[in-house]
Image (cartoon, rainbow, N blue to C red):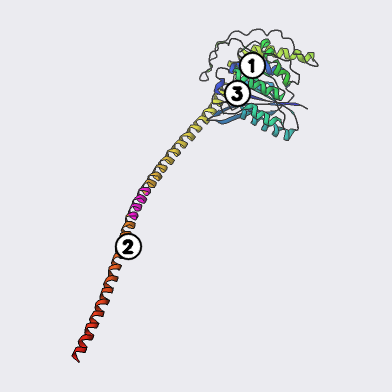
């Protein structure tokens, strides 16, 4: 079964001033040790307002070495957040789509990141969920990682059968290959030697910032001759292939000092323009949300004022009702008193009428 490798390159603002290290790692360390007859792809990832932006720089398939180098040399300036866990889920979805069309492959992911997920993602949790039913080897090349992020990266690599290493600064090819050897071995199905401490710290190389506005090339030191490098131990060594690889290492090392000048600035400008466009769109969206929120607040204030007025009216009506109830009670008492008076008067009238009738009877008797 062929390997298929997906490279996930972190271009968030956490990678600011670290892109030369990324280029050194990929161009000088990984590319010379890749098998380009096998399919691979490349994605860059960042986020704006916690909305992940994951770009397919190279679709999964058979890609050329030169195209891969060009994409790495043309990485945009770091910006935005770092959706590391989301990039993993996107990569897994990409593998499933590729396998549906091309058939099963041995899945490999190579992260190049500082390991800090700013979008509240949890990489080891997402990886653990997926690999139960869908094995994926995750290899992580840390770029100036903190100790806590290194522990997480080591955990993810171990649970997936991958490898981890950390690079602190740009270094020569021999030193870089030594640091990257666990990851390179894992990618090439060679059981990596146990490394007690995969973290190699070197004093960082002071770099002049690259400015896109002008094609001027920063002053760089004259290229150094590529050091003689012992070949990586493989189960079977093809001497002709190894010699060709050594020549490629020397050529890339020589070109490394001038890679800034050779970078396609139009590609960099285009990528940055796309990011700025996304930022502007998000600014408009945020402004609209704020405007809608303000409108909703005004409507809510009006509704609350109406409710308050209704509450006051209800309170007045309740007061009037209580007053009317009290008056009605008083009237009922008065009616009762009047009814008693009327009954007494009626009884008195009946008694008087009876006395009148008696007197009239006596008078009639006397007149006879």
Element class at badge 1:
strand
Looking at the picture, tell me which residue is in the foreground, 122 or 101.
122
Location of the N terminus by quadrant is top right
Residue 157 shows up from this direction: yes
Residue 67 shows up from this direction: no
Looking at the picture, tell me which residue is in the foreground, 52 or 251.
52
Residue positioned 55% across, 17% down in the render? 17
The dot on residue 10 is 3
The dot on residue 197 is none
Q: CB under 8 Å between callouts 1 and 3?
A: no
**In this rendering, would 230 be left or right of 313?**
right
Q: CB under 8 Å between callouts 2 and 1?
A: no
Q: Residue furthest bottom?
A: 368
Query: Which image quarter: residue 268?
Result: top right
Residue 231, given in percent of the width and then of the height, sits at 75, 12
| Residue indicated by mark 2 | 332
The earlier-in-sequence mark between 2 and 1 is 1
Looking at the picture, tell me which residue is in the foreground, 336 or 23.
336
Q: How many marks?
A: 3
């Amino acid at each position: 079964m062929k390997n298929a490798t997906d490279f996930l390159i972190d271009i968030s603002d956490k990678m600011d001033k670290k892109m030369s290290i990324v280029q050194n790692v990929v161009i000088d360390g990984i590319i010379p040790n890749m098998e380009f007859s096998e399919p691979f792809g490349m994605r860059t990832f960042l986020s704006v307002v916690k909305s992940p932006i994951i770009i397919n720089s190279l679709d999964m398939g058979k890609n050329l070495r030169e195209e891969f180098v060009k994409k790495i040399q043309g990485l945009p300036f770091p910006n935005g957040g770092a959706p590391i866990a989301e990039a993993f889920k996107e990569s897994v979805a990409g593998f499933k789509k590729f396998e549906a069309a091309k058939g099963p492959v041995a899945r490999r992911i190579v992260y190049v990141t500082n390991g800090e997920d700013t979008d509240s993602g949890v990489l080891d949790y997402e990886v653990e969920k997926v690999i139960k039913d869908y094995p994926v080897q995750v290899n992580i090349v840390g770029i100036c990682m903190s100790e806590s992020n290194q522990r997480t990266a080591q955990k993810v690599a171990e649970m997936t059968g991958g490898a981890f290493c950390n690079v602190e600064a740009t270094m020569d090819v021999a030193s870089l290959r030594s640091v990257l050897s666990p990851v390179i071995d894992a990618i090439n199905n060679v059981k990596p030697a146990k490394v007690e401490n995969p973290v190699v710290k070197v004093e960082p190389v002071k770099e002049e910032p690259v400015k896109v506005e002008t094609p001027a090339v920063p002053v760089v030191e004259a290229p150094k001759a590529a050091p003689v490098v012992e070949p990586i131990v493989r189960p079977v060594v093809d001497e002709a292939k190894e010699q060709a690889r050594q020549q490629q290492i020397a050529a890339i090392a020589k070109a490394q000092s001038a890679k800034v000048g050779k970078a396609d600035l139009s590609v960099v400008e285009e990528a940055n323009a796309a990011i700025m466009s996304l930022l502007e769109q998000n600014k408009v969206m945020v402004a609209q949300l704020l405007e809608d929120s303000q409108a909703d607040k005004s409507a809510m204030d009006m509704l609350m004022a109406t409710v308050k007025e209704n509450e006051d009216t209800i309170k007045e009506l309740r007061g009037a009702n209580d007053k009317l109830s009290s008056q009605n009670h008083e009237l009922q008492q008065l009616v009762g008193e009047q009814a008693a008076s009327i009954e007494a008067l009626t009884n008195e009238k009946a008694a008087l009428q009876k006395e009148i009738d008696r007197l009239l009877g006596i008078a009639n008797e006397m007149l006879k």
